Image (cartoon, rainbow, N blue to C red):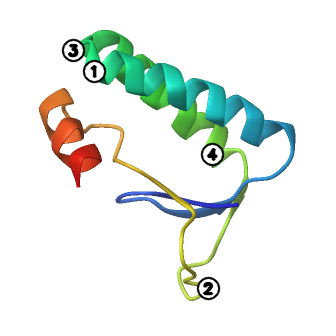
Amino acid sequence: MIVRILTEGQYRVEGEMLDSIYQLDEELMDALTQNEAGRFHELLNQVAGLVRSGEHLPIEHLVESDLILPAVDTTLEEAKKFFED
């Protein structure tokens, strides 16, 4: 799976790491809908850390992303707008 972290680039993520990302993604969306900014940022950083442990793709190897994460410094309000779109 190809995952893009906005402002950072794309990563190839595979295997068990994907299961962890999906689980954290559900918790991340829950924190977002519950307006829990601290928990949201903690989970977003955890997901981004997992993604970064995958293979970083060179910028010239631009491909369609399967999942796009907001930048880790995204505010809760910005994230709500990001996920609404």
The residue under the point 81% across, 52% down is 14
Mark 4 and mark 2: Cα distance apart in space: 17 Å
Query: What residue is pinned by disc 4?
Result: 51
Which numbered disc flags the more N-terminal residue, 1 or 2?
Answer: 1
- Position of the C terminus, as image quadrant, is bottom left
**Are there few (<14), some (14-19), or many (20+) residues within 10 Å of tag 2?**
few
**Are there few (<14), some (14-19), or many (20+) residues within 10 Å of tag 1?**
few
Q: Quadrant of the rendered structure where residue 28 is?
A: top left
Question: Contact, CB < 8 Å: mark 2 with mark 3?
Answer: no
The residue under the point 49% across, 19% down is 27
Mark 1 and mark 3: Cα distance apart in space: 5 Å
Mark 1 and mark 2: Cα distance apart in space: 34 Å
Mark 4 and mark 1: Cα distance apart in space: 23 Å
Kind of element beneath mark 4: helix
Q: Amino acid at mark 3?
A: Asn
The residue under the point 16% across, 44% down is 81
Q: Amino acid at mark 2?
A: His
Q: Amino acid at mark 4?
A: Val
Query: What residue is pinned by disc 2?
Result: 61
Rendered location of residue 55, percent (x, y)? 74, 60
Question: Contact, CB < 8 Å: mark 1 with mark 2?
Answer: no
Task: Tell me the number on the disc at residue 35.
Answer: 3
- Closer-to-camera residue (18/58): 18
Query: What residue is pinned by disc 1?
Result: 33
Which numbered disc flags the more N-terminal residue, 4 or 1?
Answer: 1
Closer to the camera: disc 1 or disc 2?
1
Mark 3 and mark 4: Cα distance apart in space: 24 Å
